[in-house]
Amino acid sequence: MESPKPRFDVVGQLGSLRRYARSLTRNETDAEDLVQDTLVRAYERRNHFRNGGNLKGWLLSILHNGFIDSKRSSQSEARRGDTLAVIAETILQPPQEHSMRLMEVRDAFFSLPEEQRAALHLVAIEGLSYEEAAATLGIPIGTLMSRIGRARATLRSLEAEQPGKAAHLKIVGGRDE
C-alpha cells in the first residue's frame, strides 16, 4: 500500500509571493499575474520539490525566474514605467506628513536598480537570511551583500539630500550588524 504524499500547501506563502511580486513588477495587476504564473509553474513542477525542503524559498525562486523570463521576452516594461510616471504626476499628495514620507520612501525604493531592489526586498521585507536570499536570486552571497549595501547607501544618500529633514531611514533585516 502506498503512503499518502504530504500536502503541497502554498496558501501560507501567498503573502510573501504577492509582496515580492509587487516589489519586482511595481504594478498590482502584473504582480497578481506573476503570482498566478508562479503557482501554476509550482503545481506543474511539484514533483521536483524536495520533501522537507524550503517551500517559501522554492516558490520565491520560481517567481523570480518567471519575472526574469517575462522581462527578457517583453519590451513593455519601459512603456509601463513611462505610463506610471505620467499617472504619478497627476496624483494629489496627501496632507498627512507620514503618508507623504511613506510615499517618498516607496518612490526611493522603486527607483533602485532591479537587482538592488530585489536583494533588499528579500532580506529587509521578507526576512530571508542572506543565504536564503542569495539562493533565491541564484547569486553568490557576496554579490547579494554588495547589492544590499549599495541599495542602503543609495537610500541613505537620497535621505541626506532632503534639506531640513532629519534622517528617518534605519537599517533593518539582514545580519550586517
Image (cartoon, helix red, strand yellow):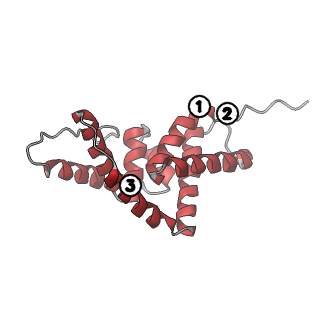
Give amino acid for label 1. Answer: Gly
Residue 46 appears in the figure: yes
Left/right placement of residue 157 relative to residue 86 reads left
Q: In the orientation shown, which residue stands out farthest toward the right?
A: 1
Above-or-below relation of 151 to 174 = below
In the image, 142 versus 122, the foreground residue is: 122
Label at residue 9: 2
* SS of the residue under disc 3: helix
| Residue 100: image location, x then y, percent | 26, 40
In the image, 66 versus 34, the foreground residue is: 34
Residue 115 appears in the figure: no
In the image, 87 versus 169, the foreground residue is: 87
| Residue 138: image location, x then y, percent | 50, 56
* SS of the residue under disc 2: loop
In the image, 4 versus 161, the foreground residue is: 161
Above-or-below relation of 82 to 160 = below
- The residue at which mark 3 appears reads as 87
Q: How many residues crowd mark 2 within 10 Å: few (<14), some (14–19), many (20+)?
A: few
Distance from disc 2 to disc 1, alpha carbons, whole Å, reads 7 Å
- The residue at which mark 1 appears reads as 12
| Residue 96: image location, x then y, percent | 24, 33
Q: In the orientation shown, which residue stands out farthest toward the left?
A: 164
